[in-house]
């Protein structure tokens, strides 16, 4: 079933957009918010996400409300679903396509419960959309395809995260508390990755030493939850001549810090997508993950990857050396490869 949503609902319709899962998935989803509001300027757009992604959409100017689903006790979840029902949405769009998202869409009791025709739980929708003719290839394409089939036009869709003044102020204050001058240039090295997808820590340290020695850049090391040991291993490789600051904080504040960084070096992951979406230059390290599908989409991002015979791989085809923490495709990426890529992203570092 295809229709122009503008012709089927009232101009001030309440629209619920459901997008659960990881940070990267929600970053891609931000590409549809502005087109929806431009097509339906008087509508009220509510986005439903999970806690890890809340900050990503909280400040988006075209999102009127953000709902956050937290897994909790039976009674806490019942309370959440009751609120969903009482909000009386006109349209609910499941862009998650998992069981939970489909159930949420159904329990919204919206007049139009919309989702992909071939989703596993599509029987919970009353409006099933077939967008296979658009031949989506990467995650962003799937987001755009579903919404475009509702009559919403798109022009060069791109993920966008808006860094608020509050985030910037929190970032500024945190840097001051860490005795870092926010006015002096700095870069961010974010080394966290799964063991079987890890770039060598000594190479991260070489990047830090190079940009400190040649450009006097401040070095900020960051990580996500559960990745502290990886930062510690990196610091053990750093020369004592290279000062650094370690920062572990909530995503919104980290993005406030990232927004002013000269560049970021990191593995593929949610932070990579978020940093790229706010416009900071990103040198993204890819190993087993297919960069053709999951690459960062920001204009100032570059992918570093070495294609070898066993790529693309899966958990069934990975070599023992990968499981041991020495993936060949990652180890082939040199420090020089990264430095050259950063200089291309940041022309101010060329010629030195």
Image (cartoon, grey):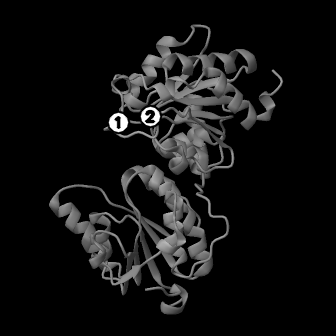
Q: Which residue is drawn at the image coordinates 49% and 58% (left, top)? A: 139
Residue 128: x and y in percent read 38, 80
Q: State whether residue 298 is above or below residue 60.
A: above
Q: Earlier in the sequence, mark 2 or mark 1?
A: 2
Q: Which residue is drawn at the image coordinates 55% and 22% (left, top)? A: 204
Residue 153: x and y in percent read 62, 77
**Circle 1 — which element?**
loop
Q: Residue furthest right?
A: 351
Identify which residue, 265 or 331, lies in the foreground. Answer: 331
Q: Which residue is drawn at the image coordinates 21% and 61% (left, top)? A: 76
Residue 344: x and y in percent read 75, 34
Q: State whether residue 12 is above or below residue 280.
A: below
Q: Pointer 2: what residue?
A: 310
Q: Which residue is drawn at the image coordinates 53% and 44% (left, top)? A: 291
Identify which residue, 48 or 98, lies in the foreground. Answer: 98
Identify which residue, 318 or 280, lies in the foreground. Answer: 318
Residue 64 horizontal side relative to residue 197, left or right: right
**Circle 2 — which element?**
loop
Q: How many neighbours does mark 2 have within 10 angstroms: few (below 14), some (14-19), or many (20 or more)? A: few
Q: Residue furthest left?
A: 74
Residue 211: x and y in percent read 68, 21
Q: Quadrant of residue 321?
A: top left
Q: Pointer 1: what residue?
A: 317
Q: Quadrant of residue 342?
A: top right
Q: Are marks 2 and 1 in contact (CB under 8 Å)?
A: yes
The answer to whether one can see residue 185 in this image is no
Total marks in image: 2
């Amino acid at each position: 079933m295809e229709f122009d949503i503008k012709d089927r609902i009232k101009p001030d319709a309440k629209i619920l957009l459901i997008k659960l899962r990881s940070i990267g998935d929600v970053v891609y989803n931000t590409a549809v918010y502005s087109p929806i509001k431009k097509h339906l300027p008087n509508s009220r757009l509510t986005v439903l996400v999970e806690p890890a992604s809340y900050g990503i959409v909280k400040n988006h100017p075209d999102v009127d409300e953000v709902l956050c689903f937290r897994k909790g006790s039976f009674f806490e979840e019942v309370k959440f679903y009751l609120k969903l029902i009482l909000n009386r949405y006109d349209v609910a769009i499941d862009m998650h396509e998992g069981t939970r998202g489909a159930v949420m869409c159904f329990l919204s009791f919206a007049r139009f419960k919309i989702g992909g025709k071939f989703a596993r739980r599509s029987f919970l929708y009353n409006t099933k959309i077939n967008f296979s003719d658009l031949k989506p290839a990467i995650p962003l394409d799937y987001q755009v395809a579903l919404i475009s089939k509702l009559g919403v036009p798109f022009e060069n869709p791109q993920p966008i995260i808006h860094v608020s003044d509050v985030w910037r102020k929190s970032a500024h204050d945190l840097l001051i508390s860490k005795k870092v001058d926010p006015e002096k240039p700095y870069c961010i090295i974010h080394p966290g990755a799964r063991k079987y997808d890890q770039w060598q820590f000594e190479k991260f340290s070489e990047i830090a030493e190079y940009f400190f020695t040649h450009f006097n850049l401040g070095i900020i090391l960051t990580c996500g939850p559960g990745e502290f040991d990886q930062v510690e291993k990196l610091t053990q490789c750093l020369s004592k001549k290279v000062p650094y600051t370690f920062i572990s904080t909530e995503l919104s504040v980290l993005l406030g810090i990232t927004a002013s960084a000269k560049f970021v070096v990191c593995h593929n992951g949610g932070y990579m997508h978020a940093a790229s979406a706010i416009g900071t230059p990103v040198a993204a390290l890819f190993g087993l993950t297919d960069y053709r599908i999951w690459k960062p989409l920001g204009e100032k991002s570059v992918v570093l990857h070495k294609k070898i015979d066993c790529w693309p791989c899966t958990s069934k085809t990975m070599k023992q050396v990968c499981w041991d923490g020495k993936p060949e495709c990652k180890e082939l990426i040199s420090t020089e490869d990264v430095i050259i890529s950063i200089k291309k992203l940041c022309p101010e570092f060329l010629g030195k």
